[in-house]
Structures are given as structure tokens and as C-alpha cells.
Image (cartoon, rainbow, N blue to C red):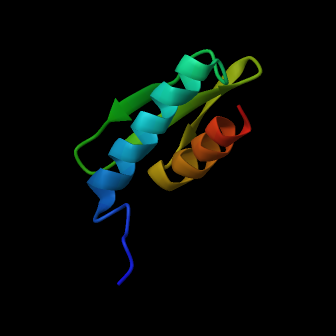
């Protein structure tokens, strides 16, 4: 039987937030922000001199890539 990391939307959002904290600690990104809404979290990851909003799925994959490169 497969072992899934995500059971629902909330666990995906929490994992993306954890990866964001890891990326900041590693120095991959200078900062990141999360806006918590009742139905979804919106992640802001800096790119050059601007921050663009990401869905939890987009943030997870982008941050996983950044953490993996460091």
C-alpha cells in the first residue's frame, strides 16, 4: 500500500509552509509569506524584486525544487 504525504488540502498547505521555512533557513530564498484564508492558503515567494502569489500546489513544487537544489 502506498504511503501518501498528503491526506487533504490542509496537510499539503502545512507541508508547503514547512518547505518554505526550510528554504529560508538554507538561504535559498530571503523570505516568504503565507496569507491564511478560510478555504485556502496563498503563498508569496520572492523572485528577483517582486513576490507572486502561488497556490499551495504550486508553492509545494517550487519550494521542494529550491530545497532540493541547496
Indicate left or right for 57 with 63 as reference: left
Up-down: is 20 above or below 2? Answer: above
Residue 49 position in % (x across, y down) = 74, 17
Q: Residue at x 69, y 22 (%)?
A: 50
| Residue found 50% across the figure and 55% down from its top | 57
Determine which quarter of the picture holds residue 67: top right
**Nearer to the camera, 61 or 70:** 70
Residue toward you, 28 or 53: 28
Residue 52 vertical position relative to residue 56 in the rendered view, above or below: above
Q: Furthest-left residue in view?
A: 38
Image position, residue 31 (x, y; %):
55, 17
Identify whether 67 is placed above or below 59.
above
Query: At 50% from the left edge and 31% from the top edge, which residue is drawn?
Result: 20
Q: Residue at x 46, y 24 (%)?
A: 33
Residue 1 point in image, percent of width and height: 35, 84
**Residue 4 found in image quarter:** bottom left
Residue 24 is situated, as x and y percent measured from the top left of the image, at: 55, 20
In the visual, does 26 lie left or right of 9?
Answer: right
Amino acid at each position: 500500500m502506498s504511503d501518501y504525504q498528503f491526506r487533504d488540502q490542509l496537510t499539503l498547505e502545512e507541508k508547503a509552509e514547512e518547505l518554505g521555512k526550510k528554504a529560508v533557513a538554507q538561504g535559498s530564498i530571503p523570505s516568504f509569506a503565507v496569507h491564511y484564508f478560510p478555504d485556502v492558503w496563498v503563498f508569496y515567494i520572492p523572485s528577483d524584486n517582486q513576490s507572486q502569489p502561488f497556490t499551495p500546489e504550486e508553492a509545494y513544487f517550487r519550494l521542494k525544487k529550491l530545497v532540493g537544489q541547496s
